[in-house]
Amino acid sequence: MFEYPKISGSFSLSEQVVLYSGDCLDLLATIPDNTLQLVVTSPPYNIGKEYEKKLKLDDYLKQQANVIKESVRCLSPHGSICWQVGNYVDNGAIIPLDTVLYPIFADLGLKMRNRIIWHFEHGLHCSLRFSGRYETIIWFTKSDDYVFNLDPVRVPQKYPGKKYFKGPKVGQYSGNPLGKNPGDVWIIPNVKSNHVEKTEHPCQFPVELIERLVLSMTNEGDWVFDPFNGVGSTIIAAIRHNRKGVGAEIVQKYTDIAADRIQKEFIGILKTRPMNKPVYDPIIAGNSLTIAPWTLEEKNEQMILLEKSSEEQNYGGK
Ligand SMILES: C[S@@+](CC[C@H](N)C(=O)[O-])C[C@H]1O[C@@H](n2cnc3c(N)ncnc32)[C@H](O)[C@@H]1O
């Protein structure tokens, strides 16, 4: 009978899935130099979530710098590191975390390849500023010789039937039959209460977000690492595409959920939102809640007025 890989609690090059229960710096200390092909994470944002103690920004950045430095030591010379972040909020003023984290990566000699805007439609409604509806993924490489596979992550063109209208290729299709580059603005639903992947973790990655990074920045058999593993979304994206996954998480209940999700992924029963599925459009879907009741009432009032005035006109015409 086929045996699924076991989930190991400690790192070794011979493992395929490692879920470390504890501080990521302790796990990193056990990983050899130049081992990891992709480090991808959504670190604590220091905004006082249940799993974090709100630190002064400088202390937070020092803590992040230690994890980034160690991750870079373990990163392959052809590897990539992606830090997915939002805003630090201080007395109503926002500080975009990518801007303050950037110097840490640059000082380590990394090169930024993209600042990906991840746009989603659901979140808190702000009253004193516009509601935040995007976060970023800052992508750095350790060298200029880095893995980037565009074909597996191409998306359908808007006009695949478009042809060259002049020049030597006139009449031929101008687009790549495999699709186009997905660009650096990614519209992917975030994991809120009605998302198929929702667990009790307050801020999970959608798996499809990480699949795109895994497919483009690694090859089969490579190691993918998440220092702030949460409920294991990064590892799921990695093993789904025959990569090896390693992650650390300090909260035991999240590691337990991650282990359960990974087992389900192995046996093919983990429900996730498929990559490239169009974003649900309630109007196209005919959802009745898209019609504002007050517009109906308004219409009714208008209709009554119209009817009244046409009655009056008719009456007057008699
Ligand atoms: C933003 S969440 C990541 C969620 C994850 N992307 C997912 O999809 O589940 C950050 C996680 O880092 C964990 N964490 C915080 N400090 C940590 C540390 N020093 N080492 C390991 N995990 C840590 C928190 O408990 C939290 O689950």
Image (cartoon, rainbow, N blue to C red):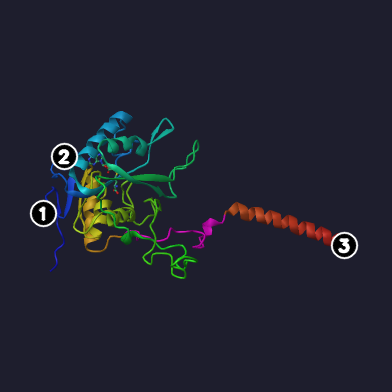
The reply to whether the residue tagged 2 has its Cβ within 8 angstroms of ligand 1 is no
Q: How far apart are marks 2 and 1 (CA)?
A: 19 Å
Label 2 environment density (alpha carbons within 10 Å; few <14, some 14–19, many ≥20): few
Q: According to the image, label 3 marks what residue?
A: 317
Whether residue 264 is visible here, answered yes or no, is: no
Identify residue for label 1: 14
Tag in front: 3 or 1: 1
Amino acid type for the residue under numbered disc 3:
Gly
Q: Does the magenta stretch include residue 290?
A: yes
Whole-percent x, y for residue 27 in the image = 16, 42
Q: In the displayed structure, would residue 122 be above or below residue 56?
A: below
Question: x and y percent of residue 75 in the render?
Answer: 20, 46
What secondary structure is found at the residue carrying circle 3? Answer: helix
Q: Earlier in the sequence, mark 3 or mark 1?
A: 1
Q: Is residue 268 magenta?
A: no
Residue 180 location (% of width, % of height): 39, 60
Q: Which residue in the protein does label 2 denote?
A: 26
